[in-house]
Amino acid sequence: MKKIAFYTLGCKVNQSDTASMEKLFRDAGFQIVDFEEPADICLINTCVVTNMGQSKSRKIIHRAARRDPKPLIVVTGCYPQTSPDEVVHIDGVDLIIGNQDRSKVVELVRERLGESPDEAPINAVHDLPVGREFEELDAAVDASRNRAFLKIQEGCDQYCAYCIIPYARGHLRSRSLDNIREEVAKLTAEQYKEIVLIGIHLGCYGKEIPGGPHLSDAVKAALSAEPQVPRLRLGSLESVEVEDALLDLMAREPRLCAHLHLPLQAGCDSTLARMHRPYDTAKFAQLLEKIRSLVPNVAITTDVIVGFPGETEEDFQASLDFIRQCRFSKIHIFPYSQRKGTPAAVMPDQISNQEKQERVHRLEEVDREGNLAYRKEQIGQESTVLWERRNKNNGLWEGLTPGYVRVYADSPENMKGKISAVRLENLFEDGLKGGII
């Protein structure tokens, strides 16, 4: 039995893609082993959203290729999709596959295994489809985890000035409603307690189909699956794509987590315009007000890029002020990364790395303030927690609320994988202390 090891870099969509490929290999009779263990094949699923992601991808490829005996090195994901000629010439690489035809990965690996090790690497990267067909790989199951990620959408047509993802992932494609229902049922039957619906541009689900379904329809399909999923969560959404129907579902369906991740990217209108973002701060603020009026106790998290070309100190200060007003419960902060082939890469007034890091630290302080304020608001309330593990340091069980607050509680029972009602009592470490009801 051939052994294969996987290494995944980047986003949750990449993690989902890797899990699906693991299932394909497991079903084909391969043994999945940890990446640090000896293996016949090493498959690296790469990331290029930042320079750091691309650099780390190369380091992992080199690390795998230096093993003795050398395994078959397979590189897939966004790096070979955007730079196939570069990746195929990295020493030790045997096979490269992009973000298309992943269903054929086992066949391609078997073909390469049957050849002499001295054969030239196989470049199996194809242009991303002009059409709109979604590659419906099965969702994978892993009994060691409580949460599963189901990719229901692929591709992006937005072309923000800083982003390489449309070139790496192609045009919009969506998983069918029937297949969403089937995959959610399958994952729930495998005892997953929470399923996260994810995509490259999740809010555009179904928009490539004339008269097609909306994201709210995909959520309804997932919630209608039998057996019923105990908890459903949404991945990242663009603010301009948040539908009233979706907010209505979130307000009245307790199984749908009251949590929205809405990337802001900048809190200054001139910066947003240079980024080619499809909103301004006024529209974003109006949406937050609407969401909070319709969905009580909702948690809203965000992404922010600092140091975008041309961002002056005044622009950044305006961003800080606006972000404070937004009252995010968590901010994911990214220093701008210059990506070759994007409009922002050749914009004037590039910001130095030193200045970007200084701004990151200032925004981190705003993040800490917002997170603390949100946790304080939860004290005294009742919530539900999906328990993940017993904390090795304090001996308490820890898990997450629908709003992604980490909760710690004492219990003599094995709580792993259970969802229970909890009263949130006080601040504790990075989250809250609670009492199981």
Image (cartoon, helix red, strand yellow):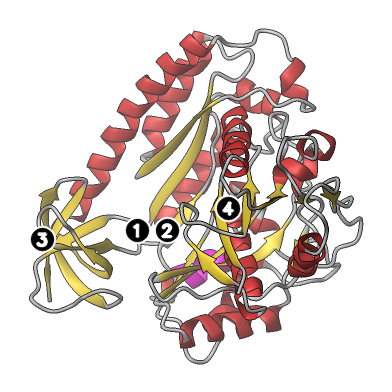
In the image, is residue 305 above or below residue 28? above
Q: The C terminus lies in which quarter of the figure?
A: bottom left
The reply to whether discs 1 and 2 touch (Cβ–Cβ < 8 Å) is yes
Quarter of the image with the N terminus in it: bottom right
Q: Are marks 1 and 4 in contact (CB under 8 Å)?
A: no
Q: List the residue tagged with mark 4.
A: 237
Q: Looking at the rendered structure, which numbered label has been put on residue 259?
A: 2
Work out how far the residue at label 1 is from the one at label 2, CA to CA, in angstroms: 5 Å
- Residue placed most toward the observer, 373 or 134: 134
Which of disc 3 and disc 1 is earlier in sequence? 3
Counting from the top left corner in percent of width and height, residue 159 is at: 76, 38
Give the residues drawn in magenta, as a range: 246-250
Question: CB of mark 1 within 8 Å of CB of mark 3?
Answer: no
Distance between mark 4 and mark 2 Cα atoms? 11 Å
Circle 2 crowding by C-alpha within 10 Å: few under 14, some 14–19, many from 20: many
Q: Is residue 422 above or below residue 332?
A: below
- Find disc 1 in the rendering and name its residue: 403
How far apart marks 4 and 3 lie (CA) works out to: 36 Å
Amino acid type of the residue that numbered disc 2 sits on in the rendered structure: His
Q: Which residue is mark 3?
A: 395
Mark 2 to mark 3 CA distance (whole Å): 28 Å
In the structure shown, which secondary structural element does the residue marked by tag 2 occupy? strand
Q: Position of residue 436 (x, y in %)?
A: 13, 73
Residue 32, position as x, y percentages in the image: 54, 68
